[in-house]
Image (cartoon, helix red, strand yellow):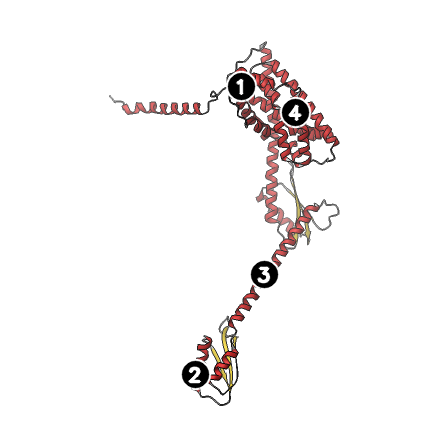
Amino acid sequence: MLLEDPNRSHVPAKRNAVLTRIGKWLQDRFSLEEDKEDEVAVIESISRGIEFRGINLWTLIFAIFIASIGLNVNSTAIITGAMLISPLMGPIMGIGLGIGINDLAMVQRALKNIAIAAVISLLTSTVYFLVSPLHSAQSELLARTSPTVWDAFIAFFGGLAGIVAGSRREKVTNVIPGVAIATALMPPLCTAGYGLATLNVYYFASAFYLFLINGICISLATFLIVRFLGYQPKLYPSLDVARRVRTTIWVAVCIVLIPSTYLGYQIVRRTIFEQAAKRFVATECDFAYRQVITYTAHYSREQPRLELTLVGEPLPPDSVNMLRAKMPPYGLNNTRLVIKQGSFKDAEIDVDALKNTITDQVIKYSQSSIARKDQTIDSLRRYIELTQTSRLPVTDLRDELKTLMPDVQTFTAANSLVMNSGKARPDTVMLVYARFARRHTVAERNRLKKWLQTRTKSRKIKLIVE
């Protein structure tokens, strides 16, 4: 009979004990029970923020004006300030809370008040943009016309943070302002008002859809946390009402997620295409006798298009074909390459881009010209220094030589370059010419040469004596 190893039976027990300790540590670390506010107090707090009347209504109007001005002048700081003032979070969280505790009366009251707030916000922003002298759509405004799935995620996680902070006994004061900034309920309504003022249906529909995304996701986050915290729900009047509520929740989630996911997917594809086009132009479109003054990447699901506008010598057809052959490695397989050059009568030229390009070229040319002049100046300076250091004191040498050899009549000395046929670099030789009143012996000439070598510290001396 085989005996069971007693140590083996302890292995599962040890593993279970470790897993139990880890589970308890995680439960204690991530528990929402600590500092949990009383359920009734939380419901009363959120319920008070639902109603739009008096100070809440005036605060909303003032915040709408501030946000509209911020969008009009393209100021992020002004828009952020308006979002901090906005009281729109109250009825939106009230919708989620009412659904979470099955309080249909609270849901109806919250829906009524958020509808009133939305209408007043649209009217206020529309009036502002009608009387404003600035009518162009700035980048801050355009940013609210392209809702994506990321906006849904931001609103959802912001709503989670907001309801968790609101359910604490000691309120976390920096959470609610942060949620108001991150979820950005106010700017989309102002952008929708701009769409009404300018009769731009696309701006109105896109911005209002972004507002719906934020509102529904915040309400969904509030609903989930309320259910997670175990708030006591009320009983629905009937099963049919409960079924309709659940169906409404799922329909709202689908309205948010399906279109925004599709739009987000298209934005990702457009961004990837634009980055690939930018890399292609920067790497492959550096020409010798022509310059790309501007390029435009037009994204399309059917066939994207990359337009290059050139100045300088026309690009030959063979070079254009070579450019097209280089596009697939950059992910531009199905992209149509359009090159505008020569006559620009029908082309739309970006004057600012052209000015910037010309300015850049002038700056580059000036910098290279200055660099060449600096090199020339440095070379001349080194030559002057070398000439000054290598200049021989001919007068002093003549006077000293006259003391040694009084019969000297003419004397001169200079450093000269001597080219040898077998060497690529020249040699420096000191040429010395002297004429005396009498003929000197070879020994006297050698003595003169050694004196010159010692005096001038030059090893190569060519002495010419008459």
Type of amino acid under label 1 = Val
- Cα separation, mark 1 vs mark 4, equals 28 Å
Badge nearest the viewer, 3 or 4: 4
Q: Which of 83 and 24 is in front in this view?
A: 83
Q: What element carries label 2?
A: helix
Name the residue beneath numbered marker 1.
Answer: 226
Mark 2, residues whose alpha carbon is within 10 Å: few (<14), some, or many (≥20)? Answer: few
Residue shown at the point (62%, 27%) measured from the top left: 85
> What separation in Å lies between label 3 and label 4 (alpha carbons)?
65 Å
Q: What element carries label 4?
A: helix
Characterize the local packing of mark 1: few (<14), some (14-19) or many (20 or more) Cα atoms within 10 angstroms. many
Q: Which amino acid does label 2 sit on?
A: Arg
Q: Which amino acid does label 4 sit on?
A: Thr
Q: Please, what secondary structure does the residue beneath circle 1 have?
A: helix
Question: Residue 156: x, y in percent?
Answer: 56, 26
The residue that mark 2 highlights is 447
Amino acid of disc 3 = Asp
Task: Relative to 86, say whether 377 is above or below.
Answer: below
The first of marks 1 and 4 along the sequence is 4
Tell me where residue 215 appears, x and y as whole percent.
61, 24
Residue 99, visible in the rendered structure = no
Residue situated in front as seen by the camera: 264 or 368: 368
CA separation, marks 1 and 3?
74 Å
Going from N to C along the chain, the mark reached first, 4 or 2, is: 4
